[in-house]
Amino acid sequence: MVPLYGALFINAFLAATILPVSSEAVLAGLVVSGRGDPALLLAVATIGNTLGSVVNWVLGRGIDSFRNKRWFPVTSDRYEQACRTFRCFGEWILLFAWLPVVGDALTLAAGAARVNLGVFVALVAIGKAARYAVIIAGGLWATA
């Protein structure tokens, strides 16, 4: 059972970074197949995905030196949009760091804006946990 949780953690971590990985599909598959405790699956996926976002926050701290690199995870347009949105809504926008496309850019913008790491982790984790809770609830409902 430990390899299952370890694989979910790695998948969720990578899904929050530059790699095109879907942690939602993996989590839903585990829930629907009845593999793993739903509460533990929620905790592992949330922690892994939040720590992956911390990688983006760290990149955001030094974004000026990486921003024009080809491997950089966010296009200039998406990054500029995220910065505008971040300035408009402030730190609370991090509750939506789970969103596809703009989520990674928001976490990078938070690092560039020097958001306190504790505040960052709390807000990102709340949003990501809520998203995963909905996925788990949907999977449990589908199998009931």
Image: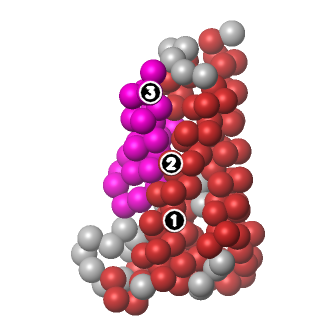
Q: Position of residue 83 (x, y in %)?
A: 58, 81
What is the magenta range? 1-26
Horizontal arrangement in the rendering, residue 66 relative to residue 53 (left or right): left
Using the image, determine if residue 140 lies above or below residue 52: above
Q: Which residue is mark 1?
A: 54
**Rendered-image quadrant of the C terminus:** top right
Q: State the mark number for residue 2.
A: 3
Per the model, the C-alpha gap separating discs 3 and 1 is 24 Å
Query: Residue pushed farthest bottom?
Result: 64
- Residue 80 versus residue 2: which sits nearer the camera? 2
Q: Mark 1 falls on what kind of element?
A: helix
Q: Is residue 138 visible?
A: yes
- Residue sitting at 45 percent across and 66 percent down? 55
As shown in the figure, which amino acid type bears the numbered disc 1? Val
Q: In the drawing, does residue 118 fall left or right of residue 16?
A: right
The kind of residue tagged 3 is Val
Q: Is residue 15 left or right of residue 46?
A: left
Give the percent coordinates (x, y) of residue 28.
53, 28
Please identify the dominant SS of the magenta region.
Answer: helix
Q: Secondary structure at mark 3?
A: helix
Residue 57 on the magenta segment:
no
Q: Residues within 10 Å of mark 1 (few under 14, many from 20)?
A: many
- Above or below, 2 against 12 in this view is above
Q: Label 2 vs label 1: CA separation?
A: 10 Å
Q: Which residue occupies the foreground of this view, 84 or 119?
A: 119
**Quadrant of residue 141 in the image?**
top right
Q: CA distance from mark 2 to mark 3?
A: 15 Å
The local secondary structure at tag 2 comes to: helix
